[in-house]
Amino acid sequence: MLSTSYVLLTIVGCGIVTLLSRTLPFVLLKNHSLPPLVVELLSFVPITIMTALWVTNLFTQHLGHLPSVNYENLFASVPTVITAAITKSLLWIVIVGVVSLAILRAVM
Amino acid sequence: MTDELDIKTAIKDTLPTVFGYIGIGLAFGVVSQSVGLSVLMVVLMSAITYAGSAQFIMVSMLVSHNPVVSIMVAVFLVNARMILMSTVVAPYFKKDSMLKNIFIGALLTDESFALSMNKVNYTDHKMSFEWFNTANLIAYFTWMIASGVGALLGQLVAHPERLGLDFALVAMFIGLLYLQVIADRSLAKSLQLIVILAEAVIIYLGLIFIPGNLLLVVGTLLGCATGVVIKHAFY
């Protein structure tokens, strides 16, 4: 069971981090601009972080050894990607992904 | 979409996106409740942290009892894209007061960002506090209520893992990645695909010797650096 103080501390700590990430650029950029190289580096963050989060979920880590494949998530990813290409709707992508995994778990 | 930037138009423009928030918010509530978070904690997390996909990561890290600082670092990294989005939006509000700037920033989301970038194509690149703030507030309250309702519904589900809801997070990452690639016109599609493949290889190799949380930081930064190098060499 998770202790309330641990969860609350995490909620507030992460709240401060998120608030600063969102508001500091507004505060700092009211009179300044970022160096072009930093802007360029940041422009790759959305695709690299999403890829990193996806790929880490396709494997199980064994430090010092090759990671093993998480077949449930790998197979459920296929219809999810196809749905993304067809519908371009976050809602449908999530629904199809969830249903795919539920079906996989029922038959595997 | 029209060139109007009043509150009524903002409501009309934002409504189609609320179904996305409802779906993910419900999933977040059900998943969080299933691993031991109370309904109150779920709602508080949505209201105070308000971090979308990062909230799923917070919950999974809470369950494996990570130190609070590690979770904060992970959330910062996942939401580092917020810095970029705020950096893009901020110039539209240079003439507004600092307080209004902070308020817009505090409730900025992926969807209100994407929606506003679509909107300025119709308004000759003008933006108003009223329009953006309305879009932000609708997203905020929809997210908070949906996650609370999800947590309540979760109590009625006996075996949540059978519903496959834990995949909602991965599916959303896939969806956001896909939508990002097709919407971002500033980077060539081929360049984005190369960087995604490079990032996947970096993460696979990194899994061998870099612990999970650190890997997201190191892997993302390496991927960004790879992207910059490839862009300058071939594009």
Image (tube, grey):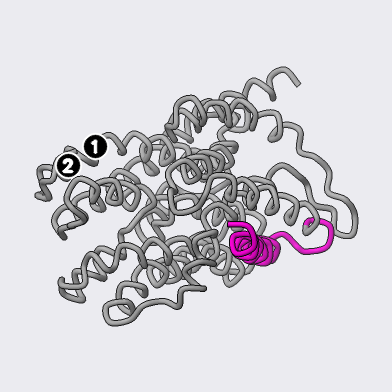
Q: What stretch is highlighted in magenta?
A: B207-235
Residue assigned mark 1: B15
Q: What residue type is labelled 2?
A: Ile
Q: Does dot 1 land on a helix, a strand or a loop?
A: helix
Q: Position of residue B158 (x, y in %)?
A: 57, 29
Residue assigned mark 2: B11
Between B32 and B202, the residue placed more toward the observer is B202
Q: Which residue is drawn at 52% across and 40% down?
A: B178
Residue at the far front in the pictured view: B234
- Image: B175 above or below B127: above
Q: In the visual, does B35 lie left or right of A19?
A: right
Q: Where is residue B173 in the image (x, y as percent from the top left)?
A: 55, 44
- Image: B104 above or below A101: below
Residue A48: quarter of image: bottom right
Between B22 and B86, the residue placed more toward the observer is B86
Residue B210 shown in magenta: yes
Residue A16 shown in magenta: no
Q: Can residue B112 be seen in this view?
A: yes
